[in-house]
Every structure is written in structure tokens, then in C-alpha cells.
Image (cartoon, rainbow, N blue to C red):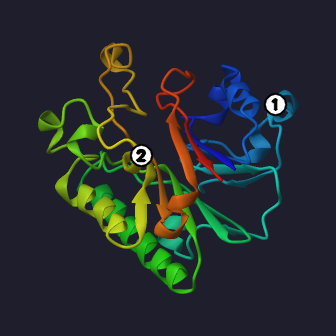
Amino acid sequence: MKIITWNVNGVRAALGKNALDWAFAQDPDALCLQEVKAREEQLDEEQRAVLKLPYTWNAAQRPGYSGVTTFYKDSPNETVMGMDAPKFDVEGRVIQTVWAGLRLFNIYFPNGQRGQERVDYKLEFYAHLLELCGMLHKNGENIIITGDFNTAHMPIDLKNPKANEKTSGFLPREREWVQKFLDNGFVDVYRHLYPDKIQYTWWTYRLNARARGIGWRLDYFLVSEALVSRVKDVVIHEGVMGSDHCPVELVLD
């Protein structure tokens, strides 16, 4: 099984760059896009023709903002929009797709860089998700959480950790919440497989950061501990262009 996650920073822009051609050419079982910034009905016929798999689309109420889309080969047994939390669900940040033995969360986590109110909102989002996942784990479910976490967990996960200690995305409180997931039944499988490897998944468009290797690892696969034995690889496709993020691929038995 192959799952690809990618923050495309605007699906219409990505389609205009032919970026999604690469994603569909990988023949994924599921493709999770974040920050699509559009409603499904805003795509024209030519853009729709590029979408090679069935999909579920969750757009934010606010036009041109946030939004996630999950494509899949096999129709899920169940699809859930959001987390049953109106405060968060209005922003179109979550799609849950459920197959036998697996629940996949496609998530665009909030960004806290617009001020303290948004940092608090982001941390509340983490808390609500972890509570939900705790209940699902108690019910015996196996979970994959993927998407743009908008947080670099450890110093190895960004180029300039010291300079960013007071920047949202690397604040101690944000990093602690990522750790809480790892302390409560989840594994960051990229770091599990590659404990010392330095790769990034996001680069600011400013100052030629991508070419200079100044990036952050913000895009993750967290999987339930019971699924770790099925993980064969996690690949960060840092050479794939089309967004300020690159795609990340999970390969499972």
C-alpha cells in the first residue's frame, strides 16, 4: 500500500504547474492533499480531467483558505469530514477515511504564525485530535495521521533551530504536543526508520531557501504502534517541485 501526502499550497496553482501529474503517476492507493484553497466546483473541466482517482473534498467555509482532499483507489467503508468539532471543522482541515483495519486522517494543522490567538487555536486542535485518537485506539482501531503538522518536532527537523526557538512552528509548547502523540500510541515512522537523516519538506519562497537547503520537516506520517511492523519505507521527495512543500510517501505491506 502506498500513501502520498502533499501540501500543494493551492490546488489550482499546482494543476497549472502540472504538479499533480507526478503524484498520480506514482499510482498511490491514497493521495492526501492539504491547503487546496478551493472548492471542488471551482475547478474547470480541464482541471478535473487531471484528477485520476475518486476523491473526497473538504473545503473551508472561508473562500480561498485551507481545505483538504483525499484521493483513493478503493472506496472507503466510511468517510468523516472533520473531527465533530465545529470550532475546527469550519476551516476544512480534516478528512477521515476508513477501510477494514485502518483509519487514515488527512490533516492540515493550523499555522500559529498570525499571533498568540492562532497558536492557542493550534494547540487546542492538537489536544482535540489526540483525545479523539485515544478513544479510537481504545476501540482497537489502527490509525495513520498524515499531512502538514506545521510544527518541526526536534532540532534535526529544521535548518536553524536556535534562530527559531521563538517562532511558531518550533515553539516548545507546539513541539510538546507532537511528543504527546508519540507518548500515546503513535510513531513518527520517518524518524523511526531514519533517526539521523536530515531532510526537509518545506522551504520558504524567500531568499532562495530551497536551493540553499534552508528548510523544515513539517509533513509527517504518524502511525499507530501496531502498524509499525507493516511500514517498509518513508520517502521524502525533496526534488519534486510545484509547491513550497514536497510530497512524502509511506509504503506499507
Query: Is 140 situated above or below 13?
Result: below
Query: Is 205 situated above or below 110?
Result: above
The amino acid type, in three-letter code, at marker 2 is Leu
Q: Tell me if 176 is positioned left or right of 228 in this view.
A: left
Evaluate whether residue 247 shows in this view. yes
Name the mark on residue 182: none
32 or 100, nearer to the observer: 100
Q: Label 2: which residue?
A: 193
227 or 176, nearer to the observer: 227
Kindly report which numbered mark, 1 or 2, lies closer to the viewer in this rendering: 2
Q: Residue at x 27, y 35 (%)?
A: 158
Give neighbour class at mark 2: few <14, some 14-19, many 20+ (Cα, 10 Å). Answer: few
Q: Label 1: which residue?
A: 50
Query: Is 244 situated above or below 150?
Result: above
The amino acid type, in three-letter code, at marker 1 is Val
Residue 219 in the image, given as x and y percentages of width and height: 45, 44
Residue 245 in the image, given as x and y percentages of width and height: 48, 32
51 or 144, nearer to the observer: 144
